[in-house]
Structures are given as C-alpha cells and as structure tokens.
Image (tube, rainbow, N blue to C red):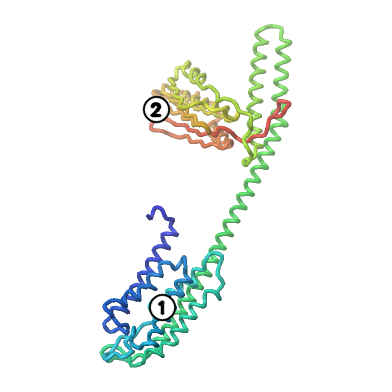
Amino acid sequence: MTRLLPPGRRRDRMADAVVVLSGAALSLQTATDPHTIVRWYGGASIALLMVPAAALAFRRRAPLRVAWLTAGFAALVWLLEVIAPGTVLRVHADHTLNPVLWWPPTAPLAAYAVMAFPREGGRPVWVRWPPVAALLLTLGWTDDVLPDSAMRHFSAGETDSVDAMVFRSFAVVIGGALLGMYAAARRRVLHALTERAERAERERHLLAEQARAEERARLAAEMHDVVAHRVTLMVLQAGALRVRAPDEPTRAAAEELRGTGCQALEELRDVIGLLRRDPEGSPAAVSEPLPDLSALVADSAAVGVPVELAEHGDPPSASPAVGRTAYRIVQEALTNARKHAPGAAVEVDVRYRTDGVTLTVRNAAPSREPDAELAASGSGMGLAGLRERVELIGGTFTAGPDGGGFRVEASLPAYVPVPAPDPAGLP
C-alpha cells in the first residue's frame, strides 16, 4: 500500500491512525479504570465511548460531523444524567475516584479537526465554531449533574472538584480549536507560497520558451536569407556549367555537384522548417516512406565493416525530416564505428511503429587499434549534433559505451509539425 500512496498521503494516514489510537486509548482509560467516574456496565460503556473515538478516522473528510458527534455525545451523557442521575456517571460513589483529565475524552481532538480541516472551498470560521461552542456549553453544565464529592483523588489524596475538571476541559478544547486554526492558516500560507512558486516557475519556463522560439526564428531567417540563397546560386551555377561544359567528365561532375546542392537544399529546408515550427501545431500533411537503410549497410560492408541489419514491423509513412534524420543517425553511427572500432561487428536494429521508429546501432569492441589520424578527423560534434537534431523533431537520443563497444539509440516520431514548404522550392 505504501507504494501506491504519495509521501504526503502516507504521512496523513499515519497521523490519522495516531489520532484515532490516542482517542481510543483515552476512552479506554476512562472506561476501564476501576476508580473512574464512568460506570462499567459489563463493558457497554466502552462501546459508547468508542463511538466518538472511531469517528476521528473521518476527521479529514467530515470534520464538522465528527465535531458535532462529539458534542452530541457530551450532550447525551448530560441529558441522561439530568433525567436519571447515576445512569452513566458514578455521582453517588461510596469510594474515592480518580479525577478526570477532561471530558469527554476525544473533545480536544474533535475541536482540532473541525478547525484544522475545512472542506474544499473553505468553510468560514463561524460555520466551524458552533460544534465547539456546543461542546463548551455542555461542559459548562457538567456541575449540574456531577457533584464535587465524586471528584477526589484515590487513597484520600488531594481533593479535586468539578470546576477543576470543567476548567481543564475548557482549556484543552479551546486550545485544540486554536491549534487547529493555526494549522489551517499555516496550510493555506504554504499552499499559497507553493502556488506562487509554481506560477513563477511556469512564467520562467514560458519566458525561456519564448526566448528559444525567437532565437530559432532568427536562426531560420538567417539560414534562409544567407545560406539557402548561396546554395541556390551554387545549384544554378552547377546546372549552367552542366549545359555549357565541353566534355562529358565536366558535365558529370557538374551534375553531381548540382544533385548534392539540391539535396543540401532539401535538408536545409527541413532544418529551417523545424526551427520555425510550432510545438503545439498539427503535423505537416506531407509524408513519405522512411528511407531504405540497406544502401548504408552495403557501403559499410564494401569497406570491410561487417554490418547486420534487422528490421521489425512495417515502415510507416513519415515526415521528410524524420526520414532524413533516421538516415543521418545510422550514417553517423556507422561512420563512427569505422573510425573508432575497426574490425568490430556492427548491429543495426530498426523497429518500426505506427507512430514512429526506434533505431539502435551497436558495435562490439574493436579487434585492433584504430588509426589515430582517421579517428582524429572530423569536428567531434557528430553525436551532439544528432542529439540536437533528434530533440528538435521531438524524439529521444542516447549514446554511450555498451559493454566493450558503443551503442547509439534514437526514438523518432512519425510526424512533426513543420510549416509547408515554400512554393518556389526554397526553405
């Protein structure tokens, strides 16, 4: 059960149990003490005193009812003694009795509960004070039914009086009510402070999101105005060179350059679209099949890297940005395996889902030392860039050692909300 309840609820349950047990202990002491003022009646008085004690279990859910029940119990005892003196209390005891600490036994606990636990919406104080006032009024009438001769210490010790018991009862009931008011006020203050802190945290989060959105928009505009424009000019110049080239090798090189530039423009369009995207927007309607990864596996196998490709499920249609990201993840992971783990077997596990795809690339420990010059090549930001790219489309990315080898895993959604492409073909 403790695993199912949050820490706050467990603490409340424990406190409720302690209160109920305390009320039961006070009631049992009052009912079972051979020198108490409560008549035994073969244990029937225990059942009577246990009713308000058991009601304390509902002190959080129905504190007002618990307080009225306790006040009603005290009024019932008083009424019975008025009608038939000696029915419940030993008002004509022929031996000395122990003084009562306060009456009834659960009075301060009920007074605390009704003031400390106002129901949702907050009952005003004047609604919660009447049962406490009724309880105090009944206590004030105790001297009408209980003579001072019944309130003496055992073994003829220092005498006690009904007025002393009434004063103690008044003190603990009022003290319990005031303590409950303090607990309720403290809880309200803590709740207000918590709400204020949460609101400030939400505002900071919104401001940070706004700043990130503005920065992404600025970067997207910069990439569109500068980078995309320059790459477009390169593609146009390569196309012109292909048409005017005097020989076939030059035309082939120009065509390859133009194709690479077009591919770069497509990827640039994806990145700019992701930078401009609205995280709360609807996914783009454009979709295409996920890329075939077997070509990457074949390229790695051609250079001597044993790669095993395992695909599970049916490839779903996805946003173009998702497909290109999946391709780049596998490409970067295989490249790193070739550079840093020569001779190691590589496993590429692809699990297609209806709402996305999970990619796992794992290589074993290298069978020989990597080439220092080859391993040092590159910017060293490949995995960091992949992580940013994956998180930009709403996926998750992890990379790290796995046994003696290395593991790269990414989970990508099928669709991401990106703006529609420019009709002119530019981002």
79 left or right of 330 in image: left
State the residue position of label 2. Answer: 365
Q: Which element type, helix, strand or loop, lies under badge 1? A: helix
Left or right of residue 9, residue 328 in this image: right
Look at 46% across and 74% down and name the residue there: 67
Total labels drawn: 2
Residue shown at 43% from the left, 74% from the top: 69
Q: Secondary structure at mark 2?
A: loop
Q: Residue at x 60, y 35 (%)?
A: 416
- Residue 224 at x, y percent in the picture: 70, 31
Give the x, y percent position of residue 195.
57, 59
Report crowding for label 1: few under 14, some 14 to 19, many 20 or more residues within 10 A (C-alpha). many
Residue at (35%, 88%) from the top-left corner? 85
Residue 166 position, x and y percent, is 41, 86
Instruction: Identify the residue under disc 1.
Output: 73
Quadrant housing residue 404: top left
Badge 1 or badge 2: first in the primary sequence = 1
Q: Nearer the viewer, mark 1 or mark 2?
A: 1
- Distance, label 1 to label 2, CA atoms, is 79 Å
Judge whether 187 appears above or below 337 on screen: below
Q: Which quadrant: the C terminus?
A: top right
Q: Give x and y (percent) for residue 389.
A: 57, 34
Residue 26 visible within the image: no
